[in-house]
Amino acid sequence: MKDDPQFKTPLFDAMVSLAESRKISFHTPGHKSGKGISTRFRKFVGPKIFSIDLTTLDEVDSLQRPKGVIKEAQALAASAYGADHSFFLVNGTTGGNHAMIFATCPQGAEVLVARNAHRSIIAGFLFSGARPVFFSPEVRQDLNMQLNASYQGTKSAIDAHPNAKALVLTSPNYYGVTADLPKIINYAHEKGMIVLVDEAHGPHLHFHPDLPVSAMAAHADLCVQSTHKIIGGMTQASMLHANAERIDIATLTSVLKLTQSTSPSYILMASLDLARMQMATEGKKLLKKAIRLAEESRKKINAIPGFFCMGQETLEEDSEHTWGLDVTKLTISVEKLGLTGFQVSHMLNSEYQIQVEMADPVHVLVIVSIGDRQEDLDQLLYSLEKISKIYFGKPGQMSSPHPFDLPPLPEESALEPRKAFFHKKDFVALADSVKKTASQVVTVYPPGIPILVPGEVITKEIIQYLENMVSIGATVDGLDESAQIAVVREPEIGRTDTD
């Protein structure tokens, strides 16, 4: 087994070797292997971490032009994930999404986008100048949840836009629900489209048969993964994987040089090298434990009055569509308690010392990963039982069964996103913005799905939704400190770039 090349960690090994050589440094970073670091910082984290906080050197290669250990480490990642090429990312999946769009969707090109896209996908269109055409994922009203892009819905969007160059999907979504990628990707390819997948929450899917199919296994052309979100990468460490048949790898490589720092963190890259090794050599065993902990906890949560945690069987109740579920995500409905997810999240944090991944109006989301232990889940269950005893059966605060449904997509766009974003803008009160043109991306964060995209005409339904979100304590990104929204200055609409 040790002969398996996946046990190798070429970048990390080279970094350790260089650190242990104790060469005199007259190069960046300025702390010089920790000698110039604040004493408080060094005492807390220890001295060794600073010895591998390196810059581009012969011994440790260059991310901008890899030809040594970084090139080898990326090749091992490609082999582990079943890709033709893999690239290390040091500014998260956000940067990977920017590069993925910028490299494949040229100015003016029509691109189909499932609306559950992260705001970084929208930013990619602002950079490239391509024209996104949105279609809506399916919604389960009984779950108070937007699921994902369905095969039939995506097929209809493709058929309605035969000139679209690409299809952009998000799978899994924040709640772990995956689209039927094999069928969707196959159909898109038949129609001559490339498929780009934001797989931020799926870097582990490839390594266990009880998890949904990964984007690479489903033959996506490009996918981006947040190694740091689910497996062993450090925060901001991600990967971009490519199948080369329909992708110009030279262009993608050039774009990454533009969108990535010329001073990348070697600590982040080392964590990618090690996380890949860990998943490739023992991922199945580690994920088996995480899946067991999650599934056992799901059953126990569903026995606590007032809580409901959906499972794969819940999604299979939908006979019209096929969904997968990453069962390591515990999406816990709190609706029957008469509380919002934000309230339950705050209670867990302030009273029980538990921090969840995110909350929305009716759910809290718990991620169970390879780093969790039985005692962690036991504490969660204990805390939910305590909350249930206090609130279940008491008069609730939720005014209606579905008070926070996502508003319909705007039916009208006055400008293309890039033009709207760069036009002059004014800030107006939400109540005064109806029929005006959005100038910035507006999202409820997390999960960061755009409620408004630059260029879209603001509707009464969108205003009401955003006001509801503000009233219950949600973070609305895209409003200023006074809850005003940026809109295109009206005389600017319809002007050309040469006016």
Image (cartoon, rainbow, N blue to C red):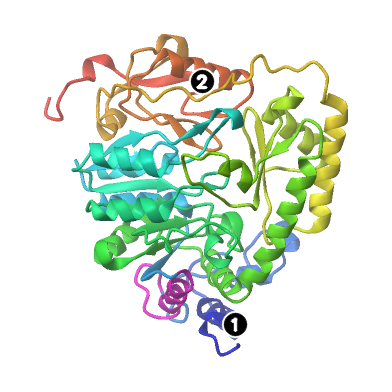
Q: CA distance from mark 1 to mark 2?
A: 56 Å
Question: In the rendered structure, does residue 66 fall within the stretch colored magenta?
Answer: yes
Looking at the picture, does residue 370 appear above or below residue 187?
below
Q: Position of residue 325 (x, y in %)?
A: 57, 49
Q: Which mark is residue 328?
A: none
Residue at the spot 68% in from the left edge and 67% down from the top edge = 286
Q: Which residue is mark 1?
A: 22
Secondary structure of residue under mark 2: helix
**Residue 40 located left or right of residue 493:** right
Looking at the picture, does residue 439 appear above or below residue 73?
above
Q: Nearer the viewer, mark 1 or mark 2?
A: 2
Which residue extends farthest bottom? 3
Residue 270 location, quadrant: bottom right
Image: magenta residue range: 62-81
Q: Main SS of the magenta segment?
A: helix
Q: Position of residue 269 (x, y in %)?
A: 51, 67
Front position in the image: 219 or 36: 219
Q: Is residue 99 visible?
A: no
Residue 250 location, quadrant: bottom left
Q: Which residue is mark 2?
A: 466
Q: Position of residue 238 (x, y in %)?
A: 49, 59
Looking at the picture, does residue 191 appear above or below residue 108?
below
